[in-house]
Image: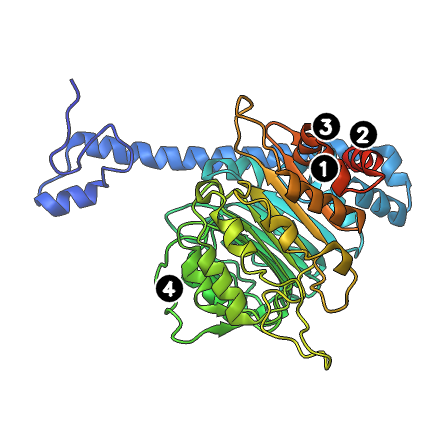
Amino acid sequence: MSHHCPFCGSMEKRGVYDNASFCSKISNLNPCDPCKRLAELDIQIIKARETLLEMRREARRLKSEMNFSHDHLIHQLPPEISSYIFQLCIPREMNRKARRAPVALIPFGAGWIDRSGRLPLSIGLFAKSHHDWAYTINPDVIGVINQCSSRWRDLTYCGPSSLLSYLVGDLQGAAQLQTLTLQVDWTESAGQFKLGDFKPTPTTLEIRGLGPKSVVIEWNNITHMQAGNISVDDCWELFRIAPRMTHCVLQGLLRAHDRFPTPHTLILHAMLQVLELSIDDVFHLFLNNISLPFLKSFTGNAHGRHLESESLISLFSRSSCSLQTLALTHYYKSGPDVMEHIFCRFSNAFIITSTNSETNQAFFPQLQSMTFKGAMPLDWTLVPDIFGSPSDVYNFRRRPLRSLTLRQVDRHPKDDPIIIDKDSLSRMLLLIKEGIKLKIKGIYPRIDILQQSIEFHVRDSALRESLGPTSNSSSEGVGKEL
């Protein structure tokens, strides 16, 4: 049977007990014998850990000396050649798989960095937890990396946020840093990326689990950004402080943490052209407070959640943007309503309604391509309607939409096949003959729905007559091409 000290707490669970002075301070008595012995043991454990860490450092130093002694060829080469070999061995993309690279920085880092002369460096640091820190990213390598921060070109860090404080750089800062990737695991103590008084000026930034307050850089220089697992108010702040951003990817938006106030007026971002967004439960809160007048491409992934098309249409209408590419994927729970709601906005394929080339308030007047990956429309007539008549495909008054891709992903193989009605299919094939890129396919199972519908209707004389005298060759040719 285990016994517990009434002043110190559990003697078995690490972290619950305190030292003897605390025990005596509470009780005004001398500490109990178990507390005394445990305090002495804690001191021995600390010394043992320090000794073990020093032994590991010595082992790494000896391995480096072994590599230096055994590798006679590399030391006989000129520094320029060995530096070039080092460049060839470094992975082109830094990710978690890069740890398995033949020339990883952990065992050979210091030596290879020294041999690389003054060449720019691409560095990846990966740690799963505090316990892995001593094994995967040791202080010696961190020291070497910090000393060459002026040569950082691409820096990737994946691990606990509390360990970001180890990346401090040197007095020269990181003037060459172009791409910065910071992906942190959840920890109780949030860390911060800060290089002393120097603010790096990367153009490409990827952050996961970190808000703008935890990344001290010159935000005005950011043009490409990818952010994940951050709150809605963090996203608002990112759009405020990165006015030159042209490409943005947002994944896994979280509810507001009240780090930044909710905007009282719309946040107008005048440079953003490409936005990729994971559509979750709070995405509408983010969209309802921004305006993107120069947005050209939008991609939304609903991840199987309900997609509120009203929030999207409101954003596009409010921004009056000249959107050229629209893609919505994985909106299963919303069914065909999302697609039909958007398709119905294309009431007229023509966007120029007068001879003086004035443009009316047409929906997406510059749209060139659309992609929908989810449910199929219930009314197939909507598909050819958005393109207008085949004879007007090259009419300058027409919207430049020339590509539509529909992909069905949530059907069971035993479900009835999807068949497009005769009239809609005939109009689609005529549009394809005029150069429209129209793809309608199923992914699970993989099948070409256009070809499936052609084969279903090919024996019907009405369809062959609607396609003209070369109906057989046209339908078969289109079917093979798709």
Q: Is residue 177 above or below residue 112?
A: below
**Percent from the top left, x then y, of residue 218?**
59, 69
Q: Are marks 4 and 2 in contact (CB under 8 Å)?
A: no
**Percent from the top left, x then y, of residue 167?**
56, 54
Label located before the other in sequence (4 or 2):
2
* Badge nearest the viewer, 4 or 1: 1
Q: Image quadrant of residue 135? A: top right
- Helix, strand or loop at disc 1? helix
Q: Is residue 476 above or below residue 153?
A: above
Label located before the other in sequence (2 or 1):
2
Label located before the other in sequence (4 or 3):
4
Q: Which numbered dot is residue 463?
A: 1
Q: Residue drawn at (61%, 35%), measured in percent from left and top? A: 58
- Helix, strand or loop at disc 3? loop
Q: CA distance from mark 3 to mark 2?
A: 77 Å
Q: Residue drawn at (20%, 34%), measured in percent from left and top? A: 35
Q: In the rendered structure, which amino acid carries the disc numbered 3? A: Arg
* Badge nearest the viewer, 2 or 1: 1
Circle 4 sits on which residue? Answer: 259
Q: Quadrant of the N terminus?
A: top left
Q: Are marks 4 and 1 in contact (CB under 8 Å)?
A: no
Q: CA distance from mark 1 to mark 3?
A: 8 Å
Crowding at dot 4, Cα within 10 Å, few <14 / some 14-19 / many 20+, comes out as: some
